[in-house]
Image (cartoon, rainbow, N blue to C red):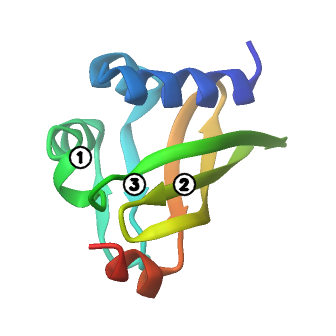
């Protein structure tokens, strides 16, 4: 399984609400850096707990409309096309850094002003 396959499997787990399967592909001391780059979660348990509130941090009507993976050495970038009730079309990217076949860092890149305006 390629690193891009692992990331794709994770997106599918998110779509299915299967967060336990998702976090199985992360190392115990992983780091999640949220949009704006100032909010950081450390540890798989903290990340898993945050996923239970995922619906509260996504804009109303949030939907992924396209998804592709770009794989590099020990990392994968997801290009995510999305829309929401107040946004007809946009993109964001997520960088996944790997330690062997497990994710040790997930970092979101998004237009934070547009994101705030989507609420």
The answer to whether residue 46 shows anywhere in this view is yes
Above or below residue 108? Residue 65 is above
Q: Residues within 10 Å of mark 2 (few under 14, many from 20)?
A: some
> Disc number at residue 82?
2
Q: Nearer the viewer, residue 96 or 70?
A: 70
Q: Which x, y percent locates residue 75?
A: 72, 44
Q: Please tell me whether mark 3 or mark 2 is closer to you in this view.
A: 2
CA separation, marks 3 and 1? Answer: 14 Å
For the residues labelled 3 and 2, the Cα–Cα distance comes to: 20 Å
Contact flag, marks 3 and 2 (Cβ < 8 Å): no
User: Quick check: can you spot residue 74?
Assistant: no
Residue at the (32%, 65%) spot, across then down: 40
Which quadrant would residue 46 be assigned to in this image? top left
SS for callout 3: strand
Q: Nearer the viewer, mark 3 or mark 1?
A: 1
Q: Which mark is residue 32?
A: 3
Sequence-wise first label, 3 or 1: 3
SS type, badge 1: helix
Query: In this image, 31 relative to 110: left or right?
Result: left
Label 1 near label 2: C-beta < 8 Å? no
For the point 38% across and 71% down, which residue is it?
Answer: 86
The N terminus - image quarter: top right
How many residues crowd around disc 3 within 10 Å: few (fewer than 14), some, or many (20 or more)?
many
Horizontal side, residue 12 vs residue 45: left or right: right
Q: Quadrant of the C terminus?
A: bottom left
- Residue corresponding to mark 1: 54
Mark 3 or 2, nearer chain start: 3
Which secondary structure lies at badge 2?
Answer: strand
Q: Does 89 sit left or right of 35 as displayed?
A: right
Question: Is residue 32 placed above or below 8 in the rendered structure?
Answer: below
Q: Give whichever of 14, 20 is nearer the camera.
A: 14
């Amino acid at each position: 399984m390629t690193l891009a396959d692992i990331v794709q499997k994770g997106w599918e787990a998110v779509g299915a609400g299967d967060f336990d399967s998702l976090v199985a592909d992360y190392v115990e001391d992983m780091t999640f850096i949220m949009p704006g780059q100032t909010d950081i979660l450390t540890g798989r348990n903290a990340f898993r707990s945050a996923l239970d509130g995922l619906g509260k941090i996504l804009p109303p009507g949030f939907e992924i409309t396209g998804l592709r993976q770009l794989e590099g050495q020990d990392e994968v970038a997801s290009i995510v096309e999305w829309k929401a009730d107040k946004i007809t079309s946009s993109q964001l990217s997520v960088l996944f850094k790997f330690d062997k076949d497990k994710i040790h860092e997930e970092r979101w890149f998004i237009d934070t002003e547009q994101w705030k305006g989507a609420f």
